[in-house]
Amino acid sequence: MTLTPTLVALLSVFAVWMIACIWTGFRARVLWFFLVLATGFALNATWMVFGLNARVFEPHALLAQLSVLFYAVGGFGLGWLAGRVAKRWRESRVDPPSS
């Protein structure tokens, strides 16, 4: 498999999108998450229709959209968990002893 410029662009967009999903989970921004999710659906549908000449309601296209949903929810969940751990870590900090 060769790394073409198109593939690099697609992987870069996917990485930025996943970071956005994780960030929304870390900050517990649910409304922003739905905006990022909708952007992911739109980008994926655009790529499938114009880049791959697929129809929107083909079974393979619907499965790809379902995988976008699962990636987004997984990223949000990972970010949410990391945010909870970070919050509890900060709360459990011990103050230095005063003399």
Image: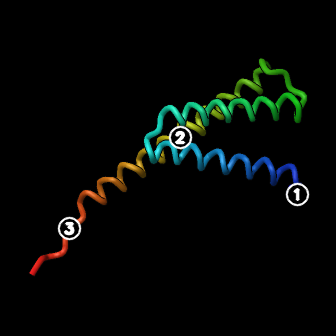
Name which residue lies at 25% across and 57% down.
Answer: 91
Marks 2 and 1, the one that precedes in the sequence:
1
Nearest to viewer (mark 2 / mark 3): 3
Q: Residue pushed farthest front?
A: 99
Residue assigned mark 1:
2
- Residue kind at label 2, given as amino acid type: Gly
Disc 3 crowd rating (10 Å Cα; few below 14, some 14-19, many 20+) is few
- Tell whether label 1 touches label 2 (CB within 8 Å): no
For the residues marked 2 and 3, what is the alpha-carbon distance in whole angstroms? 33 Å
Quarter of the rendering occupied by the C terminus: bottom left
Instruction: Identify whether 76 is placed above or below 91.
Output: above
The picture places residue 59, in percent across and down from the top left corner, at 76, 21
Marks 1 and 3, the one that precedes in the sequence:
1
Name which residue lies at 56% across and 43% down.
Answer: 21
Disc 2 crowd rating (10 Å Cα; few below 14, some 14-19, many 20+) is some
- Residue kind at label 3, given as amino acid type: Val
Left-right relation of 3 to 95: right
Q: Secondary structure at mark 1?
A: loop
Q: Nearer the viewer, residue 49 or 99?
A: 99
Disc 1 crowd rating (10 Å Cα; few below 14, some 14-19, many 20+) is few
